[in-house]
Image (cartoon, rainbow, N blue to C red):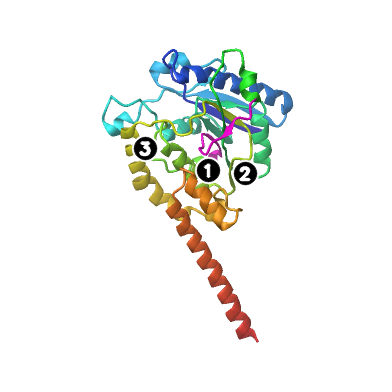
Amino acid sequence: MIHIAHIINPVAAKEGSELALSQPFTYESMRVAVKYAETVAPQSLEVKLYSVQYEEDVKAIPTGFQQLPNLSRSIRDVVKSDSVKKFPFIGDILHALLDNTTAEYLIYTNTDIVLQPHFYVAIEGLIKKGYDAISPTRRRVARDNFGEDNHAYILAQLGKAHPGYDCFVMHRSVVEKFILSNICIGTGYVSVALIHNMIAFAQKPLISDDYFLTTHIGLEVMPPLDKVVHSATREDYERNVLPKIKPLLSLSKFPYITLPLHRRVVKWVLNPNFQTSMLIELEGKSLRRQLKGLIDEFRFKTLGK
């Protein structure tokens, strides 16, 4: 049986805010997906839902979620300012699962990501194909005309594509190797750090937009970010994360690698999660290795005559 632990970070959002609107849909979709898994795959799949939060957000823990110990640190400890939002470190969230569960596979999603009912069963299928780290991209749907009773209507819409990553499924042995420093959620660099760690440490990662498994309410692709937090996480990533994982990055594990060279380069340029210069550097190393292999093969064949 495959054991999955799925964690979220609920927030006691201000009434009327976007998060206050989206979180209930997220929680209900997770509960529905668990029930679907219990019905369809009761002998092969077990899913448990977990919550990790700050003390002031305990009241926001949804029904059906097991409460893990409260978080104690935030990005405020790094930027030394109480004026920024209290974003937790993604490493603290993932270690809450590592330290308090024995599940083989760990999942983290943002609290505004709505799951398709078949989400966990589909993830089980991908795990059985040998993937030890999975990140399916979401679809975006308009937030117009949504009320509390139209959960099915949200899921029925195909919506629009999105280039970002906010759903991460990982074997615990992969997560244990992650280098995340003080990267916090609430900024684009959390997805950058997680995706690159997956590529560095997973044996067979799957980062794909071919699967319609999650939905986000709202069409905005890149919402405004706190400049102070974004700058701090970018600096932390470039100084404390990337230098350590870069030597472990393999071009063959990046998305779009099966496309022709000119097409995948365009994809990498357009995707904000990847540094084009680094990928071009990896491409160069790959081409040099291929060229060296051809030259060596020619030499050895010539010597053998």
Percent x, y of residue 283: 50, 59
Q: Which residue lies at the image location 46% right of the left edge and 33% below the top edge? A: 95
Q: Is residue 31 above or below residue 182?
A: above
Please identify the quarter of the rendering in which residue 38 is found. Answer: top right
Q: Which residue lies at the image location 42% right of the left edge and 39% below the top edge? A: 189
> Which is nearer the N-term, disc 2 or disc 1?
2
> Which is nearer the N-term, disc 3 or disc 1?
1
Task: Tell me the residue that label 3 is attached to.
Answer: 182
Identify the secondary structure beneath mark 2: loop
Check the picture and name the quadrant holding the N terminus: top right
> Which is nearer the N-term, disc 2 or disc 3?
2
Task: Tell me the residue that label 2 is attached to.
Answer: 131
The type of residue carrying mark 3 is Asn
Q: Which residue lies at the image location 48% right of the left edge and 49% below the top edge? A: 269
Task: Tell me the residue that label 1 is attached to.
Answer: 174
The magenta segment is 157-174
Residue 1 visible in the snapshot: no
Residue 59 visible in the snapshot: yes
Q: CA distance from mark 2 to mark 1?
A: 11 Å
Check the picture and name the quadrant holding the C terminus: bottom right
Residue count near mark 1 (Cα–Cα under 10 Å), binned few <14, some 14–19, many ≥20: some
Q: Nearer the viewer, mark 3 or mark 1?
A: 3
Q: Which residue lies at the image location 60% right of the left edge and 53% below the top edge? A: 259
